[in-house]
Image (cartoon, rainbow, N blue to C red):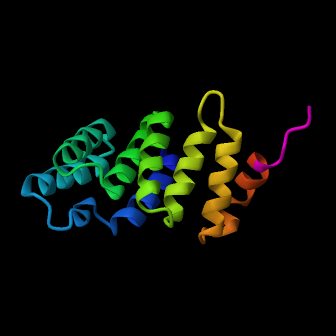
C-alpha cells in the first residue's frame, strides 16, 4: 500500500493545496470539521474514516470537484476503483483542465476487472497533454495505448 499511498498523497496535495480543509471556500463550519477529521484520518492511514468524513462533507456542501476528487482518491486506495473512476469523472466535468484528475481516473480504470484499456489510454494521454511529465507516465501510456496483438 505504501507506493499507492504515495500516488494518492501527491494527488491529494495537488487538489487540496496541501490540506483538504483549504478547499471549503468559506463553507459551513460543519464541513470544515469533517474536512479536518478527514485529514487526520488520512494522515493516520485510516482510509475508511477519511471516506466517512468526505461523505459527510459532501452531504452538507454538495459534490464539489475537489471533494469528489479527494473522495475518489480515498476510494482508489481502498480498492473501489469503479467508485474512484465515477467520482473523478464528476470532478472532471467540473474542471476538465486538471491533469491529476485524469491521471488518477486512468490509474483507477487500469485496475478494473476487466481493465478499461481505452479509458485508461485516453486518460493517460489527456493527463500528458495537460502537463503531467511524460517521464512519470510514459510506461503506462506505452502499456495501455498499444493495441495488444491477437
Q: Outermost residue toward the right? A: 150
For the stretch drawn in magenta, the main secondary structure is loop
Location of residue 119 by image quarter: top right
Q: Residue at x 25, y 41 (%)?
A: 55
- Residue 33 image point, x, y percent: 12, 53
Report whether 38 appears left or right of 32: right
60 is within the stretch colored magenta: no
| Front in this rendered view, residue 31 or 77 | 31
Q: Nearer the viewer, residue 49 or 27?
A: 27
Residue placed farthest to the left in the image? 29
Which residue, as the protein is rendered here, is positioned at the far front? 93
Q: In the rendered view, does 127 fall on the left or right side of 54? A: right
Residue at position x 24%, y 66% in the image:
22
Q: Which residues are magenta?
A: 145-150
Q: Quadrant of the C terminus?
A: top right
Is residue 4 found left or right of 135 in the rendered image?
left
Q: Position of residue 138 (x, y in %)?
A: 73, 60
- Count of residue discs: 0
Is residue 146 shown in magenta? Answer: yes
Q: Position of residue 125 (x, y in %)?
A: 68, 59
What residue is at 41 percent from the left and 39 percent from the top? 75
Residue at 49% x, 62% y is 96
Measuring from the top left, give residue 44's x and y in whole percent. 29, 47
Amino acid at each position: 500500500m505504501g507506493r499507492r499511498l504515495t500516488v494518492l498523497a501527491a494527488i491529494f496535495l495537488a487538489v487540496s493545496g496541501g490540506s483538504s480543509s483549504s478547499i471549503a471556500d468559506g463553507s459551513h463550519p460543519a464541513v470544515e470539521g469533517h474536512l479536518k477529521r478527514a485529514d487526520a484520518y488520512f494522515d493516520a492511514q485510516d482510509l475508511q474514516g477519511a471516506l466517512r468524513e468526505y461523505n459527510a462533507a459532501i452531504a452538507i456542501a454538495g459534490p464539489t470537484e475537489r471533494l469528489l476528487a479527494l473522495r475518489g482518491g480515498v476510494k482508489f486506495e481502498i480498492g473501489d476503483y469503479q467508485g474512484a473512476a465515477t467520482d473523478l469523472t464528476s470532478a472532471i466535468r467540473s474542471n476538465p483542465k486538471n491533469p491529476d484528475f485524469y491521471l488518477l481516473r486512468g490509474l483507477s480504470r487500469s485496475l478494473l476487472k476487466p481493465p478499461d484499456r481505452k479509458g485508461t489510454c485516453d486518460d493517460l494521454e489527456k493527463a500528458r497533454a495537460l502537463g503531467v511529465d511524460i517521464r512519470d507516465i510514459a510506461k503506462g501510456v506505452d502499456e495501455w495505448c498499444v493495441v495488444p496483438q491477437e
